[in-house]
Amino acid sequence: MIQDVLTDAEARMAKAMDALKRDLGSIRTGRASPSLVERLTVDYYGTQTPLNQMAGISVPESRLLVIQPWDQGSIGIIEKAIQKSELGLTPTNDGQVIRISIPALTEERRKQLVKLVHGHVEEGKVAVRNVRRDAVSQVRELMSEKQISEDDERRAEHQVDDLTKKFVEEADKIGKSKEHDVLEV
């Protein structure tokens, strides 16, 4: 019973870290990366569709993204979606593909992005702590139903706390890595 609670908590904390990595992947650094635009949604025939389901995204150079739509008629709406996004990028198209040149980041913009990274990391930590809270309440519920002893409860709570500490440290590590990428000139 306790092992089930711990296994579930660990799986949910790992999913929170995956979500954090995905969120941080969409934050722009000085280099081009398909993850910048792949989750961008485009209004495609009345349906919000992720860009990676409408086009091939490639990085031929370190500061250039190339988007090749599978439906040539969607170039205009993809271009508008990129312009409306908070990425601050200007796409150009030649009728076949959309090219996005990634300009170098200013010092001020780097500081803004670092704050954004810190915000995402904190959201990840909050998600891990919420999983911890749920796991501890499940353990206490097992104790109140007399399915486990008080010693088992204390031991399980310590295990949940250790798990939480491990994932919070991982979130910090992921955040530091992304912060380094953003500040790298």
Image (tube, rainbow, N blue to C red):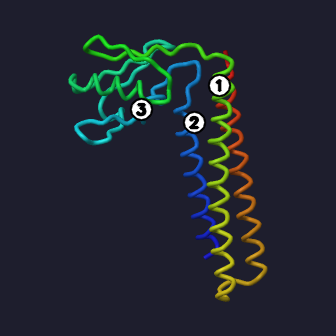
Q: Quadrant of residue 67?
A: top left
Q: Is residue 66 above or below residue 127?
A: above
Question: Label 2 amino acid?
Answer: Leu
Q: Are marks 2 and 1 in contact (CB under 8 Å)?
A: no
Q: Which residue is located at x 64 percent, y 25 percent?
A: 182
Q: Residue at x 71, y 34 (%)?
A: 176
Residue 24: which disc?
Answer: 2
Q: Label 1 is placed on what type of residue?
A: Asp
Observer-nearest of 63 and 43: 43
159 displayed left or right of 8? right
Which labelled disc corresponds to residue 140?
none
Looking at the image, how many numbered discs can be counted on the residues? 3
**Residue bearing the label numbered 1:** 181
Q: Which mark is residue 38?
A: 3
Distance CA(mark 1)–CA(mark 3): 19 Å
As drawn, the residue found furthest toward the bottom would be: 146
Disc 1: CA contacts within 10 A as few (<14), some (14-19) or many (>=20): some
Point out residue 148 in the picture as x, y percentages from the top left corner: 69, 83
Q: Quadrant of the N terminus?
A: bottom right
Q: Crowding at label 2, few (<14), some or many (≥20) Cα neighbours within 10 Å? A: many
Quick one: label 3 or label 2, which is nearer the N terminus?
A: 2
The numbered mark, 1 or 3, whose residue comes first in the sequence reads 3
* Kind of element beneath mark 1: helix
